[in-house]
Structures are given as C-alpha cells and as structure tokens.
Amino acid sequence: MTIVTRFAPSPTGYLHIGGARTALFNWLYARHTGGTFRLRIEDTDRQRSTPAAIDAIIEGMGWLGLNWDGEVVYQFARAARHAEVAKQLIAQGRAYHCYASPEELEAMREDQRKTGRPLRYDGRWRDRPATDAKPNVPPVVRIKAPQTGETIIHDKVQGDVRFGNDVLDDFILLRSDGTPTYMLSVVVDDHDMGVTHVIRGDDHLTNAARQRQIIDAMGWPVPTYAHLPLMHGEDGQKLSKRHGALGIHEYKDLGYLPEAMRNYLLRLGWSHGDDETISTEQAIEWFNLDSIGRSPARVDFKKLDNLNGHYMRSASDAVLADGTLALLKSKGAAVTDDLQAKLISAMPGLKERAKTLVELANGANFLVAQRPLALDDKAQKLLTPEARVILTGLEAALAATADWSASQLDAATRVFAEQKGLKLGAVAQPLRAALTGQSTSPGIFDVLVVLGRAESLARIADQARG
C-alpha cells in the first residue's frame, strides 16, 4: 500500500506555526515511507477565503521546502462531486431531506436549553415523508447516523477514543442551497485522493467521529488517524498572537532559515532520544507516528534563535550573503557585485555573532554605510577627544602599511599601541567605532581588509578630525 498524506488548510488566514507543523509532519511521514504528500486548499467558505491567504499558504510551504506531489486540489471546485455523494447516501437510505425551518430549529434549541439537554438536532425529519413539508421550505440533507452504540477512533497518537452515538446527531451534508458542508467535502476529498493517513490537530477529533459516519455509510476504507496535541505558549496557555504565534511568512521576514524552522517545528511534539539538532535528511529517515507525544508542545522562541544560529554558522557564506543582500536591498542599499564579494569575505566574522539574517544584515550595515558614518550611542561614547587623537596617529601608521592584509594590519596596530603605551583595546575599540559606526563588529582587522585601504583610511580620518 502506498502511503498518502495531505495538508488541507482553510485559506481564511495565513499559514500559522501550528499549521506549518501539521504540514511538516504529513510531509515527513510521506517522505519517510516513500509515499505521496498532497496539498488541498479547503476554500469552501467563500466569504472568508481570500486569494492573498491562498498565495501566503503556497509561498509559506515553498519557503519551508515542503514540496507536494501532483496539482494543488481546490475543494470548492469539487462541489458537484460532493453533492453527488450526498445523493448516493439518500438513495441508499443513509441520508434524508430535512424540511425544518430556521424558526423551528431555533425553537427546538431553546427548548433544549431550558430543559438542560444537549443542543443537537432531534431527528424530527428522519423518517417523515416530504409530503409533510410546508410549502417553499428548501430542505437540507442530513446523514442518518446510528443512534445507539459507539464510534471508536483508533488514533496513532491519542489511542482509542470513544464517542457515544447518542451524542452524534444527524448533521447536515448539503445546505438548503445545495452546497456541501465541510464535513462532507473533507471525507469525499480524502477518499477520492486516496488519503491513507489523516494527520491533523486534535481539535478535529470530534470531526473524525462524525466523518466516520459518512465513511461507514459509503463503505469506504477508514484512514489511519493521528491527531496532534495543539501547541501552547511558554505559560501553558493555548498558543496565540501574544505568544509570538506569527504567520510563517513573518518568521521568514524576521530572518530565520527554513532548515532551522523545520528542525524547530519537528521538535514541537516529536522526539528522537535526546537529539535537538536534527537535519532534514535525518528527520526523513527517523520520522514515525509512534514518537509523537500526547502532551501539548510548548513553544520556546529562545530555542528557535539558538537553532537558527547553529544553522547559520553551518550555512555556506554565499547562501547567507544572498539572504543578507535581499534584506539590505529592501532597506534601499544598492546591490552590486562588489558588495556581494565584500559580504562573502566578511561572512565568517559576521555569522559568528548573529542568530538571524536580520541580525546579520544589521551587522553588515557598515559595508553599505555612507561617509561620514552615523554613529550609534555606544560608538559615540568610544570616540572621546583622547580616542580621536589616537585615531590620528593610527591613521598614519596604517597608511604606511605596504601589505593591506589582516595579519600585517594587526601587527602594525600592535606596534602603534606599544609605542604609545596603550593596551590593544584602547586602540581597537575607537577604530571599530570609526570604521563601522558601532561598538561590535567582526574582527576589526578583517573589517579593514573588507573595506579596503582607501575607504578604511577615509573613515578613520572622518572621526579623527571630529
């Protein structure tokens, strides 16, 4: 049997971190088993579904590297097929027309509220003929669900979950305008797409019990279920915007790498011993449903920062330079081949201090800064009158250096400091401020090399003369 999984988001908002984890788990299980991973956009809610949200989902999946197999399936386009199945169920006596008016249903619910009964459809049209209907009341189509016994969901994460059939009412399959409901559409699409494993959030567990009624009525194979515990914030509460639960596109904009994001999402509810840093290749090799935990995972964005820093230090300088260039360009910097070469040259020192591409771009600002440099507060404090005098002497010492290399510049600076009776830091810190406008940077002698002789000396002269 070929394993088929699917990710089926509703395009009523952006791809959030919980949805991205669900997509990742489905993708990993399909790749681990040599199966198929499908993407389905559940756009049946026409009022809330938006093209922008669809684009964001697809772009987010692409950025994460979660490639799907086959064409994207759009649920709304399959409405005729969904309605066809509802009509089959009517013909088989497993569904029926309900002519209850909205007013009748509201009166029914009000009576249930007053008597403390569960709010559920009472089956009043389950066995009544259409001739009993009032004129001009368009019917809905309801499933004729079993009223006794229980429905058991055999779940790979939650274990066996039991639902009494007396609490599962005859829910609607087709609305009065003939459009299918979500509950029907999901089941039909999963069957037609050959989905063997449904991996999704545990807020869908009750849906699974209802969807089983359609599956059983049609005599279709029951997929294997794996309902993932929802994610919580560090305070143990349900994850929300206040915890930093952003859309995936926002994590991209914040400078995280897709491979770090995959690793981070993987560890939110899945484990492989004590391993924290897990490459995508290892994840595909190791992933299984049995290692998904039952408890809600708690997000830890410090862990994401640390993971991202690890992956940045492991990434090629050229790849990081491309990402940094894109951010610098978005801030108005002119992207040239010379700038790219300087970035690649400076990258070993830059990436040691950065945990995100945004931090990397901020650290690289000195490469595109225009003279005279704007100084941050810490840099201004370093450039005291005494420090400017030091820079005047250092400018001459560096200008006399024939070989503009890190080792020779280091040696010349040390000789200058020794001659002036100064510690190296008393020289290097003002130099850093003059060259970068900041108090932190890659190795200062690497900065001198990257900027080149003319630019470096000009920047030093700017600050030496105040």
Image: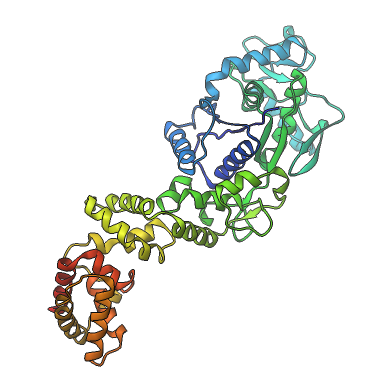
The outermost residue toward the right is 149
Q: Which residue is drawn at the image coordinates 70% and 12% (left, top)?
A: 88
Q: Provide residue 409's location: percent of width, then percent of height.
A: 24, 75
The outermost residue toward the front is 403
Q: Provide residue 358's location: percent of width, then percent of height.
A: 37, 57
Q: Is residue 115 above or below residue 357?
A: above
Quadrant occupied by the C terminus? bottom left
In this rendering, would 287 be left or right of 129? left
Q: Quadrant of residue 149?
A: top right
Q: Please indicate, yes or no, whether residue 372 appears anywhere in the rendered image.
A: no
Q: Provide residue 465's location: percent of width, then percent of height.
A: 12, 78
Q: Is residue 166 above or below residue 226?
A: above
Q: How many marks?
A: 0
Q: Please indicate, yes or no, whether residue 56 appears anywhere in the rendered image.
A: yes
User: Between 363 and 227, which is closer to the camera in this rendering?
Assistant: 363
In this rendering, would 239 be left or right of 123? left
Q: Quadrant of residue 382?
A: bottom left
Quadrant occupied by the N terminus? top right
Q: Provide residue 436's location: percent of width, then percent of height.
A: 26, 69
User: Between 26 and 294, which is closer to the camera in this rendering?
Assistant: 26
Q: Which residue is drawn at the image coordinates 69% and 41% (left, top)?
A: 227
Q: Which residue is drawn at the image coordinates 23% and 80% (left, top)?
A: 412
